[in-house]
Image (tube, helix red, strand yellow):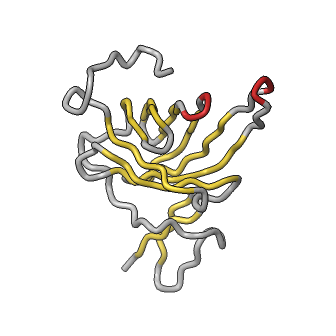
Amino acid sequence: MKSWIVKAGCVVALAVAGVGCSSAPEIPVQPRPLPSGVSYTGKWYSPQYEDMVLTQKGDTVEGEFAYKGGGTLKGTLSGHLLIFDWVQPGDKQEARQEVRGRGYFAMSEDGERFQGEWGYGDALMGGGVWSGDRISERQGPSFDPNDPVF
């Protein structure tokens, strides 16, 4: 019998005598398969970090978010979990330094929302909640995925 534990960017199947890949904190979500037909690709609204556009290609997801001048994220899927690195570039004119961190999203069964957390540096958690709702014709105005978000 195997149990799954997600630690700092790796998923490890543990046997009874198994050992994890590091002493990093565990994500409090058990990975499960991403439902058939569900993808992270699309336009999202995050109450914490505003508009986002994500693109999933295989097990890789890349995207942009609008918060405080914008930023990027890039990560890898493990089932419905996206483990990612995020960057918010600095701005000399606004005297803002570049900020980096990590995080995770867990996709809902219907593919219409995700819930997760973010952290600074190598931490996947500790910075706060990061959630999002898919923006679709049912939830708001239609959009052209080729239009800029910002």
Q: Is residue 55 left or right of residue 91?
A: left
Which residue is at the front of the view, 88 or 54?
88
Depicted 30 relative to depicted 133: above or below: below
Q: Residue at x 56, y 38 (%)?
A: 73
Q: Residue at x 52, y 51 (%)?
A: 83
Q: Position of residue 47 (x, y in %)?
A: 43, 43
Q: Position of residue 122 (x, y in %)?
A: 68, 56
Depicted 143 relative to depicted 112: above or below: above
**Considering the image in quadrants, where does the N terminus appear?**
bottom left
Q: Residue at x 62, y 55 (%)?
A: 119
Which residue is at the front of the view, 60 or 97?
97
Q: Is residue 7 left or right of residue 3?
A: right
Q: Residue at x 51, y 34 (%)?
A: 62
Depicted 30 relative to depicted 139: above or below: below
Q: Position of residue 100 (x, y in %)?
A: 69, 44
Q: Residue furthest left?
A: 138
